[in-house]
Image (cartoon, helix red, strand yellow):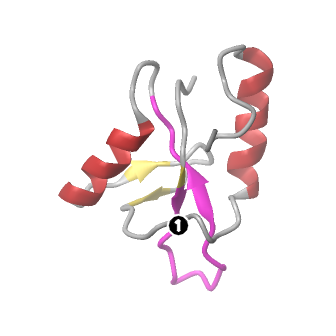
């Protein structure tokens, strides 16, 4: 279950889908912010709650959040008292 999540961007432009901000999957005690920063610096892929894998490269704040990630995060909130109301809180 994620201990902390932050939105991040979907860089997949080949599908024709509009870009969305994904919620990063992290392990308990792992910092999503640190994970995204490390992935950006090293160019390594990370995984979203919805299963999408990408290398983060842009600021996601102006994009809508992935609906699948939001649904999964809402489900996690039901089973984990420590999760915030929204991933960005």
Classify residue 22 as left or right of residue 45.
right
The main secondary structure of the magenta stretch is loop
What count of labels does the image hold?
1
Above or below, 28 against 75 in this view is above
The front one of 24 and 47 is 24
Residue 45 found in image quarter: bottom left
Residue at left offset 39%, top offset 49%: 46
Where residue 9 sits: x, y (%)?
52, 64
| Magenta stretch, residue numbers | 8-26
Where residue 21 sits: x, y (%)?
60, 61
Tell whether position 16 is magenta. yes
Above or below, 53 against 24 in this view is below
Residue annotated with mark 1: 10
Assign a secondary structure to mark 1: loop
Where residue 87 sits: x, y (%)?
64, 40
Tell whether position 60 is magenta. no
Classify residue 85 as left or right of residue 20.
right
The front one of 19 and 60 is 60
Residue at left offset 66%, top offset 79%: 18
Q: Quadrant of the N terminus?
A: top right
Q: Quadrant of the C terminus?
A: top right
């Amino acid at each position: 279950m994620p201990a902390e999540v932050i939105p991040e961007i979907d860089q997949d432009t080949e599908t024709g889908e509009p870009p969305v901000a994904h919620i990063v999957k992290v392990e308990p005690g792992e910092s999503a912010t640190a994970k995204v920063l490390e992935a950006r610096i090293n160019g390594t892929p990370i995984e979203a709650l919805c299963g999408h894998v990408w290398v983060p490269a842009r600021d996601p704040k102006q994009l809508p959040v992935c609906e699948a990630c939001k649904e999964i995060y809402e489900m996690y909130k039901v089973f984990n008292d420590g999760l915030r109301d929204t991933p960005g809180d």
